[in-house]
Amino acid sequence: MTGDVRRKVLLTAVELDELRRSGHDVTILAVHSINPYTGVPSFKGQRIEGAIDTEAYSDFQAPASFERGQRPLPEIDVLQEKARRWGLRPETTVVIYDGDRSMTAARAWWVLKWAGLPDVRVLDGGMPAWIAAGLPTTEMVATPEVSDIALSPDHMPELDAEGALRIGREGVLLDARIRPNYIGGPVLPGQPARGHIPYAISAPAPDNVTDYGNFTDGPTLTEMYRALGADGSSEVGVYCGAGMSAAHTVLALASIGIEASMYPGSWSAWISDPTRPVITGADPL
C-alpha cells in the first residue's frame, strides 16, 4: 500500500518509461529554471522524448507583490492559457520533472493540482535519474496539440497568514526553509525580518531527498515527519520563503499519505505586515 500511495505522486524513471511504453495517456512537462542564487541554468540541452518545455519562475507563479509575497499563485486564466498551449487534458497523466532535486517540479505539481488537474505526478530524481537509468534523451522540442482544458482554482488546501498561525497553535506547522533562515536574527535597517512564524517547527525541505536527488524511501520519510508531529493525527501546514520548498514538502508528505496545506505566500508574505510576530532562535516559540 505504501508503494501505491507513493506512485500516485512520484514515479521512478523506470516506472515512467513503462507507463509510456504501455500506451498510457501521458503528458510530460520539463520545468526549466535559472537558479536564483547561483545563476546556473537547469537545462543541459537534453529532454525526455515528447517533454514540453515550461519555466519555473514565469509559468507557475504571478509577479511578486508586497502583500502576496515573492511567488504568488498564477492567475487562473493565465495558467489556463498556458495549459492549453502545453496540450494538457483532464484525462491525461501529467508527469513533471526538473534537473535539481524536484524543487521546481514540486511547485509545478502543486500549482497544477491546485488548478484542478486530477492526475499529476513528479519524476522522482528528475532528469539525472532518467539519465542514470540509461533511458534515451533527445534535443528535439515537442510541439503539442493545443487543448481546450478548463482550469479552476482552490483544488489544493492552502493557508493564509491567519490560517498558518492557527495550525501552528492547534496542529503542526512546518517551516521548509533551510535552518539558518528559520533561526533568523538581526538584520540591517530596511532589510526584511528574519526568523519564523510562531509555533513553526524547522523541517528543511532538502532533508526530503537523498544525496542522489531522489526522494528518500517511505519508511524514512514517515519516521522523519512522525518525529516532528506530522503523523496524520493532527492538521499539518507548510510554508517556506515563497512557496517553492513548501510545495516540495507537501509532495513528500503526500508520498506517505499525509495531506498538508500550503501557505503560498509563505515568509515573504508573512513579513509584509509589521504587526505579525517574528520568532528568532532554534525553538518554535
Image (cartoon, grey):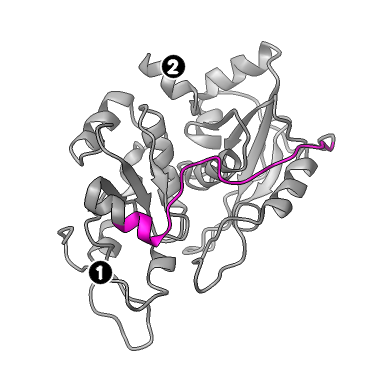
Q: Which numbered tag is attached to residue 89?
A: none
Q: Residues within 10 Å of mark 1 (few under 14, many from 20)?
A: some
Tell me which residue sits at (30%, 58%) in the image: 165
Q: Is residue 164 magenta?
A: yes
| In this rendering, position of residue 201 left or right of residue 132 | left
Count of all numbered marks drawn on residues in the image: 2
- Looking at the rendering, which quadrant does residue 33 occupy? bottom right
Marks 2 and 1, Cα distance to the nearest angstrom? Answer: 39 Å
Q: Which mark is residue 4?
A: 2
Pick whichever, 150 or 239, lies toward us: 150
Mark 2 / mark 1, whichever is N-terminal:
2
User: Mark 1 sits on what residue?
Assistant: 184
Residue at figure coordinates x 20%, y 39% from the top left:
229
Q: Is residue 217 above or below residue 173?
A: above
Quadrant including the N terminus: top left
- What amino acid does circle 2 point to? Asp
User: Which quadrant holds the C terminus?
Assistant: bottom left
Q: Is residue 232 above or below residue 81?
A: above
Q: Residue at x 42, y 33 (%)?
A: 214
Across and down, in percent, residue 59 comes to: 66, 53
Residue in the foreground of this view, choosing between 118 and 248: 118
Q: Can residue 125 be seen by looking at this rendering? A: yes
Magenta portion: prevailing SS class = loop
Tell me residue 160's x, y (percent): 43, 58
Is residue 177 at all visible to an observer of this figure? no
Q: Left or right of 244: which side holds 22?
A: right
Q: Secondary structure at mark 2?
A: helix
Residue 135 coordinates in the image, percent (x, y): 60, 23
- Secondary structure beneath label 1: loop
- Residue at the limit of the structure toward the bottom, as seen here: 189
Residue span colored magenta? 146-165
